[in-house]
Amino acid sequence: MGKAPKKRSLADKVRKTKTNPAIKNNPFEVKINRKKFDVLGRKTKHDVGLPGVSRSKAINKRKETLLKEYKQKNKASKFVDRRLGEYDAKMAPEDKILQRFALERQRIHEKKDMYNLNEEEELTHYGQSLAEMEKFNDVVNSDDESEEKGLLSAELTASHFGGGGGGGLLRKKTSGEQQQEDGNQRAKSRQELIEELIQKSKQEKRERQVQKEEAQELTEKLDQEWKSIQSLMVKKTAKTELADKPEEKPKLDEYDMMVRELGFEMKAQPSEKMKTPEELAREEKEKLQKLEADRLRRMMGEEEDTKAQSQTRMSADDLNDGFILDKHDKKTLAYQDGKWNIEEEEEEAAEDEEGESGEEQESDEEEEEEEASSEEEEEEEDGQSDLESEQESEDEEKNQEDDGKPKKTLSKEEMKAQQQAAKAELPYTFAAPESYEDLKDLLCGHTPENQRLIVARTQKCNHPSLAVGNKLKLQKLFGFLLEYIGELALRTPPELTAVDKLVPELYALCQMFPDAAAAAVQRVLADAAHSVEELIELKGHAPFPTLDTLIYLKLTALLFPTSDFRHPVTTPALLYISLTLTKCPVRSFQDVTTGLLLCCLTVEYVSFSKRFLPELVNFLTGTLHLAVRDKTSLGYTVAPPFRPSGKCSDLLVLSDPESCRSWKKKPLPLSATRCLELKDDLDRDHHRLTCLSACLDLVKRCCLLYKDLPSFTHIFQPVRSLLSKHLSIQTLPEALQELHREITDAIGSAPTAHRRLVFDKKKPIPLKLLTPKIVEVLDYGKKRGCTREEREKERLKHKYKKEFKGALREIRKDSRFLAREKLNEVMNRDAERKRKVKELFGSLATQEGEWKALKKKKRK
């Protein structure tokens, strides 16, 4: 057999149409596809392309296929018989008719036809037509209802619901029954039937009630007979047997014992709720304002008005339950010295009652008069609010104890004494100072403790949460306090006690406004550093800082953290100290004292961070050098600001070695930085020993700080040689000798051997070696793979990807083609509509012209 010819589609016919040779020869219609490289022996098919021809072929193809499908969309040209079972050959004609009829009946009884009752259908109830049943609209009264619901007799059921074969009393009788009943007796009317039905229902109710009473009487009789029999069945034990048996008390388990112990424990009292800082500040301000008002009243000599009491106003909704429990009435048991302390509590309560009874008798008469007057006023002023009455009742409860006691009138002398005491008393409220002069005037003439109270009360009365501008006022107050502390330090003598009292308030302000405090302290330190640098540029040296600067440096350590690696306040302060220890020469006892105080501050600064400062060790070494007598052969180097020998190099050398016996150890006073009252050589030697003691103590503290440094022995080698060779221990007091030994032991016990600095031994990391991957190429230009299955898989993947891209491209082109066709349809419809509108307008214009011409003709 020959092979059947393949059916060609319309798209294939469009594709196979031949191209016009004129188009092929036109260079503007030809597109040459360039090759990357030429391969000998390979036949090429697509060296030259015709994009215009391909595009026109594709458009023609879509017109023949896609456009026809689009135009035939939603158009049906066939009639389909959709009757049930029409195309089912297995169904019999009778079954088809029955199913079609059932489907039709179901369609009729849908929701829309629910109340559409046809005349052919007849509604029945229990097989009886509802149209033949008579209406029964009488409602049974509640008195006729039976107690036992749901129990209806057969006659009632039949009369109410009818139906069935028997029918009911009110059922419409048939013609046969009516003739039979006429023969026996006359027919009863509807009213007679209803009365007969009511009588029967009442009779049945009465019978049920009688049965219920008989059953209740029988139950009571049985109960009485059972009680008489029950006494015979119980076995009684003799009293002698009960007396012989001992009573066994139940043993308490661990749970009951624990419950009883917990009952004797102290009850926890509820605590007040935590308040916010704003609430606390508001309460503090109100408290101070109240105290200030009380002080002003006492200063003016006014007595507290205790006679005039606020009138209580009772509202209509008051339940008279605003009582207060003065004490806890619940008695708690306590065990003390082997006895319960109930009697002591009772005695104390009796004493309290006796004391209160006298006060109550005295105040009864006054209360009666007040109640009589208050009742009259209540009738007149019932419109007052409930809140006012509650507040006034609370005030009365607070003043209740004071009202019962008789008040004594003060004499003139006592009043004057009270006024003087109130005037001398410190005010409780203060306004924030606007300038430094206002602060000075506010604190002038007060003791250090009162100055602290003034600053604290000013801070509480001007808390930032109370008003908007208080924050700026308190920030200014911090700067004013810093300036005032500097002024106190420069007074003669310096008022260091007042400075000490003001430091806590300064710390509170710093915690409240850290940024403003840091800026204020930075300005003070910057001014001091600039002054020192200017003097060094002019003279080459500068004097040691004054006492106010020392106090500022101490405050910096108290207000800000000193252990930070870099801090905006403490780091500049530490640099300023290093500058003064290096550039300020030592020429007097005041310079030595100031330098040692700076060293104390430096040790305090670096106590946590253990930061090494060479200026500190250098100054301490130089201070010890001032106590050396023989400076000819030194085993150490003396660095500035000290000199190996000269005018001021023997400041701490003792003039009399015997003065060591009368010397007592004491701290260096801060006032020694300004003025020293040294009357004779003994006082000078004592001051020299005090400075030397402070220096050795600082050296000891530095040894403890820097003992973990690898270069510890090298750093303190000059100190060790100075103490062991040049500063004789025999010429020092016992306290200094002990410090001398501790320092030398600490330096000598440090390890002196060090290992050489070498690189750590590590295994060398080899260089990365990238070995090339050699792939044997057998088939050029084809998908490669190790096995046949992998090659086939790669080929199918490549084909799928290629077909997928082609399908997407064709779908996009089809969508653009359909969009163009839809747009053309819309434009054609619009053009047709415009043409018809023009025709209509033209015909209307012609008609209008004819009508006007006819009208003119009629006028003529």
Image (cartoon, helix red, strand yellow):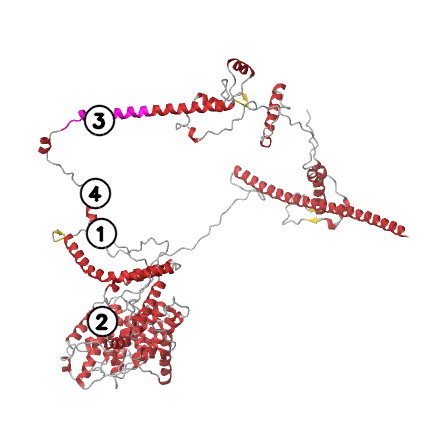
Residue 836 lies, with reference to residue 429, above or below; the image says above
Q: Earlier in the sequence, mark 3 or mark 1?
A: 3
Please name whichever residue, 561 or 467, is drawn nearer the observer in this view of the structure.
467
Evaluate if marks 4 and 2 touch, with contact meaning CB atoms under 8 Å apart: no
Q: Earlier in the sequence, mark 1 or mark 2?
A: 1
Q: Amino acid at mark 3?
A: Lys
For badge 2, the amino acid type reads Lys
Q: Is residue 781 visible?
A: yes
Q: Residue furthest right?
A: 860
Q: Secondary structure at mark 3?
A: helix
Quadrant (top left, top right, bottom left, bottom right) of the N terminus: top right
- Within 10 Å of disc 4 (Cα), the crowding (few <14, some 14-19, many 20+) is few
- Sequence order check, earlier mark of 1 and 4: 4
Q: Amino acid at mark 4?
A: Tyr
Q: Which residue is mark 2?
A: 700
* Image coordinates for residue 76, horizontal then vertical, percent: 69, 33
Secondary element type, mark 4: helix
The answer for how far apart the CA atoms under marks 1 and 4 are is 24 Å
**Residue 255 placement (x, y as % from top left):** 21, 43
Q: Which mark is residue 330?
A: 1
- Which tag is nearer the camera, tag 3 or tag 1? 3
* Label pair 1/2, CB-CB below 8 angstroms: no
* 217 in magenta: yes
The residue singled out by tag 4 in the image is 255
Circle 2 SS class: helix
Residue 227 numbered tag: 3
- Mark 4 and mark 1 in contact (Cβ < 8 Å)? no
Which amino acid type corresponds to the residue marked 1 in the rendered image?
Answer: Lys
